Amino acid sequence: MFRRISVPLRSVARRTYATQNVKVPVQLYGLDGTYATALFEASAKASSIANTEKSLKELSDLIARDPKTGGILTDPSLTKSDQESVIKIVTEQLKADNVFKGFLDVMASNNRMGLLPEVIRQFQVLADAYNGRVEAVVTSATKLDSSIMKRITAALEKSEFVGANQTLKVSNVVNPAIKGGLVVDIGDRTADLSVARELTKFNELLSTAI
């Protein structure tokens, strides 16, 4: 599925999938975007986008639970043989398919495993767009309870940012630095309703007055 060659990955993807009519829903940039796009195209060709998304989520969760595993996976000092062994163990644990395993092998062969966290994030952007999902991130100073999250979700679902054929995916991120209030990121829009923002505006006003 993937070949270990030194030419740019984007050109490999173009040559391999040019006849497959695979439409990438979002154009990504940077090397991490190139790898994520190539993985998306390979997964689409194999009708395994959902499987790849699941494997990436499980891999991300595994790294979060066991940072040592993440450190080993992305360690550039490992020999190719050792890295292949680690990838084999991890993909077997995740019950990942050949598309996913082959992709990790290519990243390891090109010494690009350090890009893995960003590739995972970028692939999620593609998968969300492909499935008509709109992501909203609600940042608060403390964790929001389920009733508040339900009210926020209901309000966002009725907003102009979520189309008729789209589904909303809402997550809560805790950042004590905002001091209070909320910061809502949905798509490429941000609504900053935080106390920190108001304090900044107040300080700017005082500076101007002085």
Image (spheres, rainbow, N blue to C red):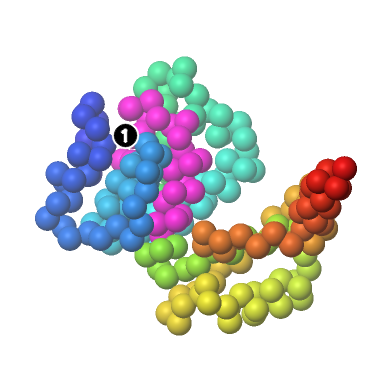
Q: In the structure shown, which secondary structural element does the residue marked by tag 1 occupy?
A: helix
Q: Is residue 80 above or below residue 45?
A: above
Residue 134 place in picture, x, y as percent:
50, 67
Residue 190 place in picture, x, y as percent:
61, 60
Nearer to us in this view, 172 or 195: 195
Q: From the viewer's perspective, is 98 left or right of 87?
A: left
Nearer to us in this view, 144 or 63: 144
Where does the magenta region start and end? 100-127
Task: Answer whether residue 91 is magenta in the image.
Answer: no
Residue located at (42% from left, 27% from top)? 83
Task: Answer whether residue 109 is magenta in the image.
Answer: yes
Count the marks: 1
Q: From the viewer's perspective, is 59 left or right of 68?
A: left
Q: Is residue 176 visible?
A: no
**Magenta stretch prevailing secondary structure:** helix
Q: From the viewer's perspective, is 154 left or right of 114?
A: right
Residue located at (51% from left, 46% from top)? 59
Residue located at (81% from left, 46% from top)? 208
Specify the farthest residue to the left.
19
Residue 81 place in picture, x, y as percent:
37, 22
- Label 1 Cα crowd, 10 Å radius (few <14 / some 14-19 / many 20+): many
- Residue at mark 1: 106
Q: Quadrant of the N terminus?
A: top left
